[in-house]
Image: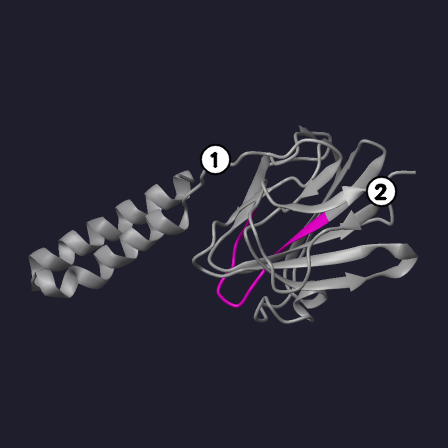
Amino acid sequence: MVIDGIYYALGLAAGGTAVAYAAGPVYSIPMFAAAGFCLYFFRDPEREIPTGDVAVSPADGKVVAVKAEAGGSTRVSVFMNVFDVHVNRSPIAGRITEIKYKKGQFLVADREEASEQNEQNLIVVAGGGSEVAFKQIAGLIARRIVCYKRPGDEVRAGERVGLIKFGSRVDIHLGPEWQVEVRHGMRVRAGSSVLARKRTV
């Protein structure tokens, strides 16, 4: 459980209790329901991390794009709805070389233009002779991107690096040394689903 969920749930439950006392139990139901949803939304299950030369998904959700980019790279976009786990994880083991936050719009996160136009936080991890960049991207409802790490931090593959609150998207940019293993429409899980494997020379 992410601690934020407990804070939100306690605040809503306290509000629900006050409403129940002042107006009656029936009127407090929406606040208690919202408190329960916050506990569900901020869940943070343990995951079994694959081994080997693989890049794991940084987010739970649905693959909404697998796009070729310049230089032989590929962008994989994962859309998280409000029912997905929203904790983000590092796709590979290595050292964080860059973190760059950019303000932007709050378009619906499954739209293609959200990759460039929405508010986002870029994280670059270098390790194992490769460099992988991924973006935490805000959505229509998500208005807060959280990142636990700083440049210079060492991370393990599948290690928690942050979260995005209430519906969003994560893009991962993989160089030509990676063979992408997912396709549009697939469901993936952060830390445990393999997005790509290192090509053998």
Q: Decide which of 26, 171 is in the foreground and name it.
A: 171
Q: Quadrant of residue 137?
A: bottom right
Q: Decide which of 116, 105 is in the foreground and name it.
A: 116
- Name the quarter where the C terminus is drawn: top right
Where is residue 6 shown, x and y percent of the image? 33, 42
Could you tell me if residue 58 is visible in this image?
yes
Whether residue 192 is situated above or below residue 31 in the rendered picture? above
Where is residue 73 shown, x and y percent of the image? 84, 54
Instruction: Name the residue beneath numbered marker 1.
Output: 46
Instruction: Answer few, some or many: residues within 10 Å of disc 1's Cα (few below 14, many 20 plus, some between 14 and 19).
Output: few
Judge from the rendering whether residue 186 lies leftward or rightward of residue 130; answer left or right.
left
Task: Classify mark 2: helix, strand or loop.
Answer: loop
Q: Residue at x 59, y 71 (%)?
A: 107
Please tell me whether residue 141 belongs to the stretch shown in magenta. yes
Instruction: Name the residue beneath numbered marker 2.
Output: 199
User: Amino acid type of disc 2?
Assistant: Arg
Where is residue 106 shown, x and y percent of the image? 58, 68
- Name the quarter where the N terminus is drawn: top left
Q: Quadrant of residue 113?
A: bottom right
Which is closer to the viewer, label 2 or label 1?
2
Q: Decide which of 164, 91 is in the foreground and name it.
A: 91
User: Which numbered tag is attached to residue 98?
Assistant: none
Mark positioned earlier in the residue sequence (2 or 1): 1
The magenta stretch is 134-146
Check the image and tell me how it is coloured. one colour
User: Amino acid type of disc 1?
Assistant: Glu
